[in-house]
Image (tube, grey):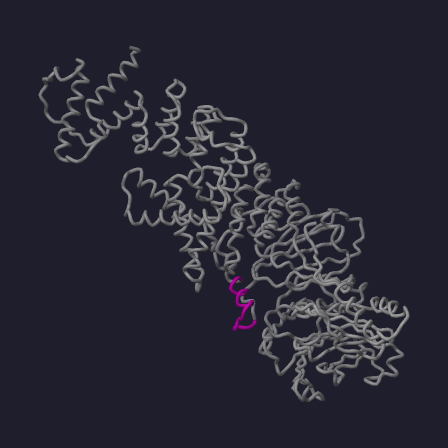
Amino acid sequence: MALRLVADFDLGKDVLPWLRAQRAASEASETGSGGADVLENDYESLRVLNVERNGNIIYTYKDDKGNVIFGLYDCQTRQNELLYTFETDLQVFSCSVNSERTLLAASLVQSTKERKRNELQPGSKCLTLLVEIHPVNNVKVLKAVDSYIWVQFLYPHVESHPLPENHLLLISEEKYIEQLRIHVAQEDGNRVVIKNSGHLPRDRIAEDFVWAQWDMSEQRLYYIDLKKSRSILKCIQFYADESYNLMFEVPLDVSLSNSGFKLVNFGCDYHQDREKLSKHLTLCVFTNRTGHSKTFTTSLENVGSHVTKGITFLNLDYYVAVYLPGHFFHLLNVQHPDLICHSLFLTGNNEMIDMLPHCPLQSLSGSLVLDCCSGKLYRALLSQSSLLQLLQNTRLDCEKMAALHCALYCGQGTRFLEGQIIQWISENVSACHSFDLIQEFIIASSYWSVYSETSNMDKLLPHSSVLTWNTEIPGITLVTEDIALPFMKVLNFKGYWEKLNSNLEYVKYAKPHFHYNNIVVRREWHNLISEEKTGKRRSTAYVRTILDNAIKVISNLEARNLGPRLTPLLQEEDSHQRLLMGLMVSELKDHFLRHLQGVEKKKIEQMVLDYISKLLDLICHILETSWRKHNLHSCILHFNSRGSAAEFAVFHIMTRILEATKSLFLPLPPGFHTLHTILGVHCLPLHNLLHCIDSGVLLLTETAVVRLMKDLDNTEKNEKLKFSIILRLPPLIGQKICRLWDHPMSSNIISRNHVTRLLQNYKKQPRNSMIDKSSFSVEFLPLNYFIEILTDIESSNQALYPFEGHDNVDAEFVEEAALKHTTMLLGL
């Protein structure tokens, strides 16, 4: 299944053995078998009451005398502690202990019989008590009413020293919420007592609400009240300095009944009427900083089936899991909610759905999930293996996209997970029609490799190559709205609220968003390449800085790779790719410096190197995987061999890599284009090869062409190939390559270039019509006249530029080449 629940706590394993040991110790002097039976009965009454903010778990059980016993399990030390014992047969439904474990608040229900004889408060159905437990001392009645009262201590962020005042929330079934301020003092050493227990100050926090939720981790209270038939969601933030603020009021487009009443996350609620609750809306609030409002509507496939279970919401930090047993399981991407394709929607009787628990679960912070029925606390984890299986087996592009992102979120750059995904991609490179699989993997995986470096990375780097998604997802409709500003009711934002307000403004006003792209790099790279072709390059220092950036990237990349590479990448200069690499380093560093105020420059530089190195490493990894799968060897690096099916498969994957990087203008590892060209020459007919070169699929590098000229002999077929390649080279590289090929064709090209250079500024001068024929090997007046002009120009140039050389190419060389070419044309 896509979601795994790993038990962090189990009443049966973490508490029951301790209870048995405690009982055995207390009855060590007794004999008989009755103790074990009593313990089993104790276990039947053993249940979890609450999980506090620090992770400590409060539980209760009844002993053989009917006494109510409260215990605490410390999640850090994994030790149990007895908190208090009520020597009265009562039913506990709410309990909380303060962070110092000096005060215990509990709400208990009395039976009719107990009401009559209870000394604390006879006649009342519900008792809410406050107990001094360090050591056990006074008991104060906070409420004695006929309605249920839930209790919850506030937990301040600062726990290094005890606070003189504790705050306790009382949530009444009569639809009001109060906060009690409890002053404590130490007496006789470590003894903690309540000061002025006869009068505890209290504030009325909320009234007339129909729904409330407690956010244990962030100390926030959410509640809904009805005003003029409108549902208004409100949030109160409690702070460590004992203050609180109403943060926002938001109208909800949902209908709630004023007669209803529901609480979420106020401990394990065993007394709310499940039948009544099933008729009310299932509503949960999760804190998130993205600043979007999205409404998902899902249709149930089994329309005829009766929905007996409620919807369960689970907070998984980056995702929110929503599932209805037997109907659907959704993973909503709340970190990047822009596109619906980044969320996973599974419907029907899918095994991933049916394997999840069917009992009500309570979602806590840190991906913790409490199953009150079984007394187990789980840690909810996304299953990498199930997500990879879904990626491989599903036919829908939207599910492939979502599964890919979920899996990468789980792994966050681990080599093993990437290897599994790459293995599948190399075998299914054309599996997706709505997006480029290689492109999406490279962008998403590179994003996760640096995601944890700063909290703002989701704004600064793209996590996906897809900008829009118009393909319908079966059974799902989505409506997106920007949250209206101003959203907050207070001005002095702190912590989360400051971040949320910043993101709200970002969503509303940042057009376009801050995500990095290579538009500037593309323009600058083309300028540098144009300057290279014309021989007019800007300052050497600027270019050297760019190339030095590339050297740092490659060094950083090689430091990551511990083993030898199978493919011949990163072994040649390939100045064009190094320029692209270096420019991307400069531009990305400037991008980070603009938006990451306060982050050290050295850290930013390393983040940039890590990100670009990761891009290149993923490309190398994809190619290495394909190379290893097809068992290729270094012998293919020569042109004088024929292509095989294996080489064609690798050529195909390299072509897809090139397509993926080209539209985003991402750099490729130096040596990539050379290897791609070698495989292209092996695998493609000449006309297909030339078409790939002309259309930019194959890029001719100097290394590849030099090797081609050296490896291939001068058969008619090879001559045609060489000549076609030379004609497609930039002039400067073409001239260099021609000098390596001892052939009339190359001589002809060299001669043409030489003549063009000489005559580009030639001005016709009056000349003597008589030509000295004795200086020419052949009497052919047009050629003789032309060569004499070239000789004069060369002489003039030599006088003006005495140190300029032309690789022994002169008028005599041109004459010889012209005669040879004419001879060939005439068939002589």
Which residue is drawn at the image coordinates 36% and 49% (left, top)? 548
Number of on-image labels: 0
| Residue 473, x across and y down, in percent | 64, 46
Q: Which quadrant of the structure image shows residue 378? A: bottom right
Which residues are the magenta region?
Answer: 489-503
Look at the image and tell me in which quarter the C terminus lies.
Answer: top left
Q: Is residue 450 visible?
A: yes
Give 788 or 705, whichever is nearer the viewer.
705
Which residue is drawn at the image coordinates 54% and 41% (left, top)? 436
Tell me if 45 is positioned left or right of 462 in this view: right
Give 493 or 798, whichever is nearer the viewer.
798
| Residue 373, x across and y down, in percent | 78, 62
Which residue is drawn at the image coordinates 54% and 39% (left, top)? 625
Q: Is residue 495 magenta?
A: yes
Q: Which quadrant of the structure image shows residue 102? A: bottom right
Residue 450 sits above or below residue 78 on the image: above
Give 318 or 477, whichever is nearer the viewer.
318
| Residue 395, x across and y down, in percent | 65, 40
Q: In the image as oriented, which residue stretches furthest toward the top?
A: 828
Q: Is residue 406 magenta?
A: no
